[in-house]
Amino acid sequence: MFRYFAATTARASSTSRLGQRVVQSRRVLAGTTRIGQIRGMSTQQNSSLSDSNVRYTIMAVAAAAGLSLFGLAGYAMFFGPGSMYPKPVRNLLREAGMAYMRPPEKQDLPKALECYEQALAQLDALGTSDSQHARDMPHVTGLVARVATVCTEMGDLDGAIEAYNDLLERLLGTDGMRDPTTQVRRLLDDSLDKNERQGILRALGCANKLAETYEARGQRSKRRSAVLPHARAASTADADMAAQWYGWCLQLVMLTYQNHFNHQQLADNKPTTQTPSFDPDTLPSYFPVDIVTSLMYNAATFYSGNAQIELAEPLLQRALDLMRHGADGDETNVCRSSILMSHLANTGVMSGNLSAAERWSIDGLALAKRFPNNADCLNSFIALTYDLGIVYEAAGSLESARVQYRQAAEIATSTGDDDAAKLASEAMTRLAK
């Protein structure tokens, strides 16, 4: 989901997935995705405007509503009917629900977690002799997912990571966790049982959540590293794990899509390709556009946060292709496309490709202006206006840059976005010197 609105530089970037607005530095990591495959997805042209080696502070924008339903569709777990659970487990789930399913100020998360974990332990014990409650049954894995969610809400990221790993092992087994191609082969099997296919999609959503949680824990460790030197090593290790799981998700989706696309090409007597078209109509029916674009966005923001623009940029471009650049005129797609363009403008600034930054800024602004009352369009309008100011400043058109910065500051101030207003004001101060 679009969860970002923070200041960042090419060396310092905010990538909080928990809605926090922070500025922090991030280490450049080696992703575990097939780097050549991602780079090959890029359609970006070389700069024609004078490139710049100057480091500019950029503005990354988040949407008020998420890009996708990944948290609901791709990751959806569920409890079965109450009758599926033995009475002692039902009692525990009822007690947990009374503690958890309440307004935030009235929740008792520790109590809820205790009851959910006790219920899970009882089900696992029953599952050793009763296949109805086997550890990979949906009503059991749904409970593991709830444990992970409660841990996350408590700020217990260690517990959440443990639960997500447990969930993946239940859904996929150790071999499936190690190699996503095993799941690709299963997804491409037309005879695969519907429930089994749904289990793989749940695993995909879980893997994405695991990557996000490793990333969040790594960020937390990095913030603590100023006073706890050993925390830096922990931050690096978690970032490596985040890269591994983002790569796992991307390989699963892209390899499945590539094979599905070429199968359709052959069926239509057309040549196969190394890169699919990224037309949303060519996706497998079990990969909704929202899920694929969400995954690409999440991974792209992780890579750009680690200055891996060569990985982030093609993912953002292809996500935009899948949304047809907002050409359908749908308000949601138009505003989400404008946000993707704001991130592409940022990658142009960060890489010094100012002509690309200018083009994405102008195109994104044209979309954002269409729905000025939409929070997503409004947020992207501020960021894109600011980015265009960076382009003009780098090109030496200082008065044009000043106009853009002033407009970004005024709109950000009027909407109560203090971080954006501060960035734009600082830019104007810089030009006044």
Image (tube, rainbow, N blue to C red):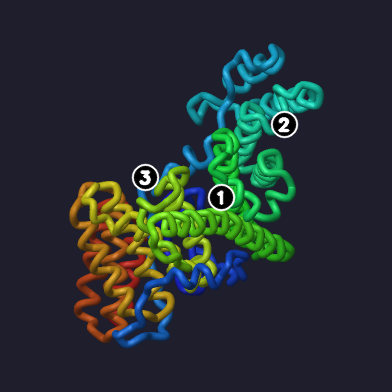
- Residues at circles 3 and 1 in contact by the CB criterion of under 8 Å: no
Q: Secondary structure at mark 1?
A: helix
Q: CA distance from mark 3 to mark 1?
A: 18 Å
Q: Amino acid at mark 3?
A: Ala
Which residue is the site of mark 2?
135
Query: How far from the left and from the top, in percent, is residue 60?
Result: 39, 62
Q: Secondary structure at mark 2?
A: loop
For residue 191, side relative to residue 115 (left or right): left
Whichever of labels 2 and 1 marks the residue nearer the N terminus, that label is 2
Residue 222 is tagged as: none
> Would you call the spot at circle 2 few (<14 residues within 10 Å), some (14-19), or many (20 or more)?
many
Among the 4 quarters of the image, the one containing residue 261: bottom left
Residue 16 percent coordinates (x, y): 51, 55
| Helix, strand or loop under label 3 | loop
Quadrant housing the C terminus: bottom left
Query: How crowded is the residue under tag 1: few (<14 C-alpha within 10 Å), some, or many (20+)?
Result: many
- Closest to the observer: 381 or 399? 381
In this figure, which residue is indicated by the disc labeled 3? 65
Residue at the (71%, 65%) spot, across then down: 233
What number is the disc on residue 208? 1
**What residue do we see at 30% from left, 57% from top?**
324
What is the distance, in whole Å, between disc 2 and disc 1 at their CAs? 21 Å
Asked if the residue under mark 3 is in contact with the one under mark 2, i.e. CB atoms within 8 Å, the reply is no
Among the 4 quarters of the image, the one containing residue 385: bottom left
Say if 41 sits above or below 98 in the image: below
Q: Name the residue rendered at 48%, 51% in the picture.
A: 20
Q: Which residue type does callout 1 highlight?
A: Asn
Which is more foreground, mark 2 or mark 3?
Answer: 2
Amino acid type of the residue tagged 2 in the rendering: Arg
| Residue 372 place in picture, x, y as percent | 20, 51
Residue 390 on image: x %, y %: 31, 75
